[in-house]
Image (cartoon, helix red, strand yellow):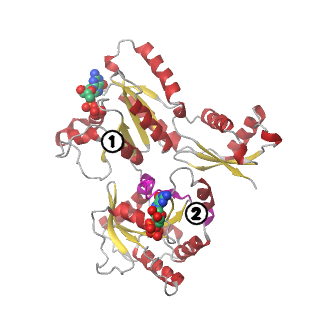
Amino acid sequence: MSFTLAIVGRPNVGKSTLFNRLVGKKLALVDDQPGVTRDLREGEGRIADLRFTVIDSAGLEEATDDSLQGRMRRLTERAVEMADVCLFMIDARAGLLPADEVFADILRKKNANVILAANKAEGKAADATILEAYALGLGEPIRLSAEHGEGLLDLYNALTPIAEARAEQAEADLPETDVDVGDDDEDAARIPTKARPLQIAVVGRPNAGKSTLINKIIGEERLLTGPEAGITRDAISVQQDWGGVPMRIFDTAGMRKKAKVQEKIEKLSVSDGLRAVKFAEVVVVLLDVEIPFEQQDLRIADLAEREGRAVVVAVNKWDTEDDKQDKLRDLKESFERLLPQLRGAPLVTVSAKTGKGLDRLQQAIMRAHDVWNRRVTTANLNRWLTGMLEQHPPPAPGGRRIKMRYMTQVKTRPPAFVVMTSFPDMVPDSYKRYLINGLRLDFDMPGTPIRLYLRDQG
Ligand code: GDP
Ligand code: GDP
């Protein structure tokens, strides 16, 4: 059987919004199912191919009469008891509030399996809260925007091991008891993680050759039956070993076309591409060598960068190109000029039709994924920072000395760094770019977005 997820947190953080997104609008929200209290909404949630039960502990705002605190606590406790895992939601815009601590406390006492999520994290508003949230001692929060559907891939990745553990448990035919995990037995609560498929999306303008490429990768056999369409609501995916590496490939219009689904057959629209990008770890931007770097290609590549995905640019139909050397030089020039934010991302030439270059594409994807997951030690970073500061000290706007003291990596996927500095608001963008480009070069991190946050050292 599948697992149960409870969404908990103080009122107004966005629990219901997420609930509605996971459950979908058309599914009626069932309040009167047996075993479900009137205050807890329950529904069938989905993200891509994951299915689970979701419990929403919202609906407290109406309870203005008796002790709100007490009711909130009881309701949350009940939700936690019903769930395999709790999504503890905080509000990235509001920051960490004392009320959040109340919930953290409940979760700790109940020994719940917790995924921390900072909601309303669209844009850059979340950065400060993300850092604050470490204080909860629940690890790194997932950035979510329930309203805009962002961060679902990270949630998917966090939930998958739980689903897998559940499936294994069912397979082993173990009785599903409420395991009470004692404080001294932390290991027992740990969910085993398995090698997960690397998630890639192939995006590009219509006729770039996306379906030809994917079909080449998944092979003739699958083509006969066609990938199972409709298994996901937001994007269609297929899992396939590629060069011995398990991959899950998210496609948009291409596979739908080949699967002959009885629905309006459409070519890639930008919004299809956007959806695929959200699910991917590595985004392959597939260009047509005849018309590379079209507006649509640039938009989606830029989006992938902003979403923090690793990017590989593949130029397709290379078999039709006569003057390969000149063309390659042109392409590299255009790439640097038109997509400076993706500096260093690999550019690979392929022929989806003949299969030439696909091994190099696969290598580039793996490498980009690797870099995306890269972690640099604090010691190395600080040694590096000292050198960078000496080589080119930060400017002194209005005579104020900007002192950068300390640096650490706070996150991977993509790599994110925090620099403790005086006057963070006065550091010019050009100086941030100097540091980011330096990181990219000196720690060999091409093809991944790099985030750099400046924090006031107080
Ligand atoms: P709940 O009380 O925790 O269930 O919160 P709701 O789901 O009712 O959301 C509270 C408010 O936050 C509503 O006005 C939502 O529209 C808003 N909200 C929810 N998710 C987001 C988000 O991702 N971004 C922003 N900016 N607002 C959100
Ligand atoms: P999609 O719209 O991006 O899925 O593109 P398709 O895979 O449907 O391909 C569009 C057209 O380009 C088809 O006629 C393909 O046969 C052709 N095509 C795809 N890849 C290649 C290639 O590597 N070389 C050549 N010459 N043609 C290709």
Residue shown at the point (54%, 59%) measured from the top left: 141
Q: Which residue is mark 2?
A: 94
Q: Quadrant of residue 24?
A: bottom left
Q: Is residue 403 above or below residue 339?
A: below
Labels 1 and 2 touching (C-beta < 8 A): no
Q: Nearer the viewer, residue 108 or 77?
A: 77
Q: Is mark 1 within 8 Å of ligand 2?
A: no
Which mark is on residue 122? Answer: none
Q: Residues within 10 Å of mark 2 (few under 14, many from 20)?
A: few
Q: Which mark is residue 241?
A: 1
Which label's residue is closer to the chain start, 1 or 2?
A: 2
- Asked which quadrant contains residue 431, the reply is top right
Q: Give the image location of residue 47, x and y in percent.
A: 35, 57
Looking at the image, which residue sits at the far bottom?
Answer: 66
Secondary structure of residue under mark 1: strand
Is residue 104 located in the magenta-colored stretch of the structure?
no
Q: Position of residue 383 (x, y in %)?
A: 73, 41
Which tag is nearer the camera, tag 1 or tag 2?
2
Is there any visible trace of residue 127 in the rendered image? yes
The residue closer to the viewer here, 394 or 192, is 394
Label count reads 2
Mark 1 nearby-residue class (10 Å; few <14, some 14–19, many ≥20): few
Part of the protein shown in magenta: 134-157
Amino acid type of the residue that numbered disc 1 sits on in the rendered structure: Asp
Q: Vertical placement of 323 versus 77: above or below?
A: above
